[in-house]
Image (cartoon, rainbow, N blue to C red):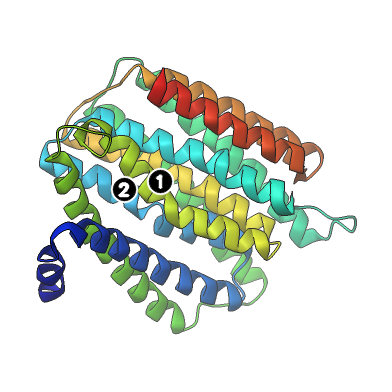
Amino acid sequence: MTSLISWMESAGLATPWFFVGLFLAASLLMIWRLEAMAAGGMEGTVLGTLIMPYCTGMGNLIFAIVLGLRGGSGAEVVTNCLVNNVTNLTLLLGVPAAIWGLSVADTKQDSARQRNRLSMLLTLCAVLFFTGTAWAMGRREIGFADGLVLIGLFLCWQAFHVVEVLKSNRRQNKSFGWMLAVDLILLGIGAYGTYLSTDWLVAWVSNIKTGFISASYLGWLSGWLDVLPNGLLAFYYGRKRQAEVVYTSQVGDGHICIPLCLGVFALFRPIVVPPFFQTGVMILGAVTLVHLIFIGAWGRLPRIVGWILTAAYGIFLYQGLIK
């Protein structure tokens, strides 16, 4: 791996693209194994809520750790998290809904789909709770103690899902096979590739002082890079008409950002919350309510609402970048 990194660094102007390619290759490795786990019988909501977020959200978590180790700005981590979450809930759910429609309920309403629907509603409620908690704590600053609370909330949420998976396996007399260990090792390799690429790209952008691709827009640029794996999942599973995986992967990924990423960075140093945080949280809360209403009442996201959510992403970009 060291020789590969050295070769990539010697590529001159193409070097940043090689590291972006490494990031995408590591993400695709993780997505490949996730697909294998799904094919092995793992339920879509379990896959999307418990395992997939660690793969698609690994870039965000590593970004927070790298910036913490490098003495970076907490405002960039906040921006990274907001860009990730808002993009997931507007653009990456809106466009698949506009093209294929996202339905997590059918006329038969069998028990499995009903469980998936209830699980998604619970996950959306968690988005509101975690985002609201971060907003309440971070009116001015998120400190060390706040970081511990945010991480604790995330761990409790994940522990709840682990218990649910174990209970479900016990009821159905299922067990995890030996391939799970292989899959986890491959996912770890993908995570390491994500770390290497993120660390190099953060250092590279931080040394650029002018232009759009520069340290001034590090939070936005890293947020868009980290959201690329989510986009691949959204379109792949949207085309396969697996709306529950599309939903839970995008919504579940948001929990890696808020509260976990904010909490992890706050352990290094306090986060001085930027003014854009308030606007981002309001947009995030409003969009989450839209999803709750349509999934709760009708079990689907209509195509017209998908276009509206896509337009809402344009408003988010205007508020954050232009205005």
Where is residue 132? Give x, y as percent: 48, 25
The answer to whether any part of residue 148 appears in the image is no
Mark number displayed over residue 75? none
- 52 or 94, nearer to the observer: 94
Please, what secondary structure does the residue beneath circle 2 have? Answer: helix
Residue at 63%, 35% (x, y): give it.
309
Q: CA distance from mark 2 to mark 1?
A: 7 Å
Please, what secondary structure does the residue beneath circle 1 have? Answer: helix
Do the numbered discs 2 and 1 sit on residues whose CB atoms are within 8 Å? yes
Mark 1 closeness class: few <14, some 14–19, many ≥20 residues within 10 Å: many
Residue at 30%, 15% (x, y): give it.
140
Where is residue 261? Give x, y as percent: 33, 41
- 149 or 261, nearer to the observer: 261
Q: In the image, is 84 to the left or to the right of 145?
A: right
Q: What type is the residue that disc 2 sits on?
A: Leu
Q: Residue furthest bottom?
A: 178
Q: What type is the residue that disc 1 sits on?
A: Ile
Q: In the image, is 202 to the left or to the right of 307?
A: left
Q: In the rendered image, which quarter contains the C terminus?
A: top left
Indicate which disc, 2 or 1, sits on the residue closer to the N terminus: 2
Q: Which residue is mark 2?
A: 61
Q: Which residue is mark 1?
A: 256
Where is residue 206? Give x, y as percent: 15, 40
Where is residue 313? Give x, y as percent: 54, 33
The answer to whether any part of residue 170 appears in the image is yes
Is 266 situated above or below 109?
A: above
Residue at 58%, 51% (x, y): give it.
248
Is 261 situated above or below 37?
A: above
- 77 or 207, nearer to the observer: 207
Is 284 situated above or below 158?
A: above
Residue at 34%, 21% (x, y): give it.
138
Question: Which of the 4 quarters of the picture holds residue 278?
Answer: top left
